[in-house]
Image: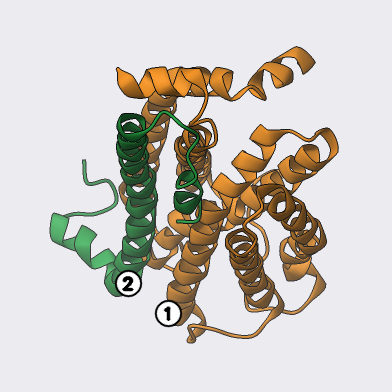
Amino acid sequence: MLGQFKTFHAFLLMGGFAPYVWSAYGVVFIVVVLNIFLPIQKKRRIIKMLKQQELQEPQPIKEAEVIYES
Amino acid sequence: MWQFMHKLSSPKYFYDLSGKMLPWFILATAILLIYGLYAGLILAPPDYQQGDGFRIIYVHVPCAIWSLGIYTFMTITAAIGLIWRMKMAHIMVRASSVIGAWITFAALATGSIWGKPMWGTYWVWDARLTSELILLFLYLGFIGLQTAIPNRQTAAKAGAILLLVGFVDIPIIHFSVDWWNTLHQGASLSLLSKPTISPSMLYPLLAMIVGFGLLFATILLMRTRNEVLLWENQSRWVQRLISC
């Protein structure tokens, strides 16, 4: 189960490289989670905005351009 | 093939198809990354020179490879968009740029963290590191250009030119470790020759590389779908989608 490591503690220590290994993995983890979260949140915003537009006026809308840039 | 490309250039077709594909992409990504992380962090033996510090390779190399891969994808897609005037191509290039910038940042950051214990420094101005930093600036330049030009057609054209000119950096990054003396080690993997690392270290690395590729494809699909919704907000199928 623990493969190369005798104890879970040894796994965490990473043979003395713990600060480097875990900070590198941490950076990548944050970048990945952020990049998954951002498009999900944007989709919610877009659907909400389009619904509001539909309620207000069925005419061509210009505000849509604004959100492109975010 | 051409017929498929033509169909794909229809935003509605793309939106429907990508919606069906997304769950499978997510599943495949999760399997590969879980296996890669477990085998890379726990099962693979420590490196005979770098000890357990080498395990940074399993996040650094996928990020570095895809920082080049996404740029190459963007350049080809932008060229297709310019030549055949495909709206979908422009949308996809825009959607890729932010992920590309983030992943280049991740490659630089993990490399820098790795450099400290192995080289004794976070940063040196050598060929590999400098050309990778220029790649980050190319991504940021592209994003800046897209935000600065309100007209989408003009923005797409200007962006494509930036990408094509900047593409010269890609072979420079790739061959920099052969062309110049550098602290950065040479390639451990090559498509043309046998790998120089043992299978127990290699398989998790391959899984992480493919897994990250699928992860970016997933994020790209999500972002592209968002842009399609915005661009097509007047069309009937989007209105129907919203109202139900």
Q: Label 2 is placed on what type of residue?
A: Phe
Residue at screen point 81% across, 71% down: B179
Three-letter code, disc 1? Pro
Tell me, what hue is chain B? Answer: orange
Q: Secondary structure at mark 2?
A: loop
The answer as to whether the residues below labels 2 and 1 share one chain is no
Considering depth in this image, is B236 or A26 the residue closer to the camera? B236
User: Which residue matches tag 2?
Assistant: A17
Residue B110 shows in this picture: yes
Determine if residue B61 is in view.
no
Residue at the (73%, 33%) spot, across then down: B86
In the picture shown, does residue B175 fall above or below B15?
A: below
Local packing at callout 2 (Cα closer than 10 Å; few below 14, some 14-19, many 20+) is: some
Res B59 quadrant in image: bottom left
Q: Are marks 2 and 1 in contact (CB under 8 Å)?
A: yes
Label 1 environment density (alpha carbons within 10 Å; few <14, some 14–19, many ≥20): some
Which corner quadrant holds the N terminus of chain B?
A: top right
In the image, is residue B104 above or below residue B79? below
Locate the C terminus of chain B and report the quarter of the image it occupies. top left
* Picture quadrant of residue A36: top left
Shade representing chain A: green
> In the rendered structure, the residue with mark 1 lies on which chain?
B
- Measured as percent of width and height from the top left, residue B134 is found at 67, 72
Q: Which mark is residue B117?
A: 1
Residue B11: x %, y % from top left? 58, 25
